[in-house]
Image (cartoon, rainbow, N blue to C red):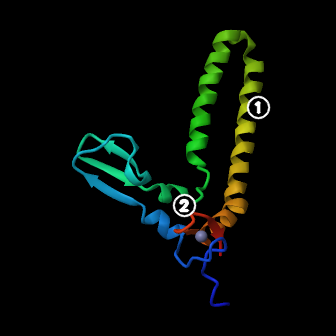
C-alpha cells in the first residue's frame, strides 16, 4: 500500500476521519440552558428536553450515520394491526353476510405482508452487509468536506 493511501483524493489533505469515528464522536450531552430544537453555532443541531438535559449531535455525525437494517418485528406488528383493523372495517362495511370475500382479502393481505417481510429479510441479508462494509471504509475529509471510500 502506498504511503499516500490515507489522504483525501480531492485535496490531498491528511486530515481525514472515518465515518465510524465521526459518527460516534458527534454526540455530546448538554446541560443547562437549551436553545430548544434548532441549528446553533457551528452547524450543531440541538434537541433539548426541558431546559436541563439533552443530546447534541453534530452535523458531521449526522452525515456519517451508519446504514440501518430494516426492522422486521416492528414492520410485521404494524401491518398486523392494520390488517386487523382493515378486516373489522371491511366486515362492518360489507356486512357479515359477505364473510367469504372478506376472508379472501384478509388472507391476500397476509400473503402480501409475508412477501414484503421476506423482501426486507432478503435486503438485510444481501444488501445491508455491503452498505455497512462501505460505510466502515468511508472517510470524510475535515478540510474540504468530501466523503470517499478508502
Ligand atoms: Zn479534502
| Vertical position of residue 17 compared to residue 98: above or below | below
Q: Give the x, y percent position of residue 68.
A: 58, 56
Q: Quadrant of residue 19?
A: bottom right
116 left or right, relative to 65: right
- Secondary structure under badge 2? loop
Graded by Cα atoms within 10 Å as few (under 14), some (14 to 19) or many (20 or more), the crowding at tag 1 reads few
Foreground pick, 144 / 118 = 144
- Seen at 60% across and 58% down, the residue is 67
Q: Give the x, y percent position of residue 105.
A: 75, 25
Ligand 1 quadrant?
bottom right
Q: Quadrant of the N terminus?
A: bottom right
126 left or right, relative to 65: right
Graded by Cα atoms within 10 Å as few (under 14), some (14 to 19) or many (20 or more), the crowding at tag 2 reads many
**Sequence-first disc among 1 and 2:** 2
The circle on residue 108 is 1
The circle on residue 71 is none
Marks 1/2: CA distance?
40 Å
| Vertical position of residue 37 compared to residue 125: above or below | above
Q: Nearer the viewer, mark 1 or mark 2?
A: 2
- Seen at 74% across and 13% down, the residue is 98
- Seen at 21% across and 49% down, the residue is 32
Q: Give the x, y percent position of residue 22.
A: 48, 66
- Secondary structure under badge 1? helix
Q: Quadrant of residue 36?
A: top left
Q: Which residue is mark 2?
A: 64
- Seen at 73% across and 24% down, the residue is 103
Q: Give the x, y percent position of residue 17.
A: 52, 72
Foreground pick, 62 / 44 = 44
Q: Quadrant of the C terminus?
A: bottom right
Amino acid at each position: 500500500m502506498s504511503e499516500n493511501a490515507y489522504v483525501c483524493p480531492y485535496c490531498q489533505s491528511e486530515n481525514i476521519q472515518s465515518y465510524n469515528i465521526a459518527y460516534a464522536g458527534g454526540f455530546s450531552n448538554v446541560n443547562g440552558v437549551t436553545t430548544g430544537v434548532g441549528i446553533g453555532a457551528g452547524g450543531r443541531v440541538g434537541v433539548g428536553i426541558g431546559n436541563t438535559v439533552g443530546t447534541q449531535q453534530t452535523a458531521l455525525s449526522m452525515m456519517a450515520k451508519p446504514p440501518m437494517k430494516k426492522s422486521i418485528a416492528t414492520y410485521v406488528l404494524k401491518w398486523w394491526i392494520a390488517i386487523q383493523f382493515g378486516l373489522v372495517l371491511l366486515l362492518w362495511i360489507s356486512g357479515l353476510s359477505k364473510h367469504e370475500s372478506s376472508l379472501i382479502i384478509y388472507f391476500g393481505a397476509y400473503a402480501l405482508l409475508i412477501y414484503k417481510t421476506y423482501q426486507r429479510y432478503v435486503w438485510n441479508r444481501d444488501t445491508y452487509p455491503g452498505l455497512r462494509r462501505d460505510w466502515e471504509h468511508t472517510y470524510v475529509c475535515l478540510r474540504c468536506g468530501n466523503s470517499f471510500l478508502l
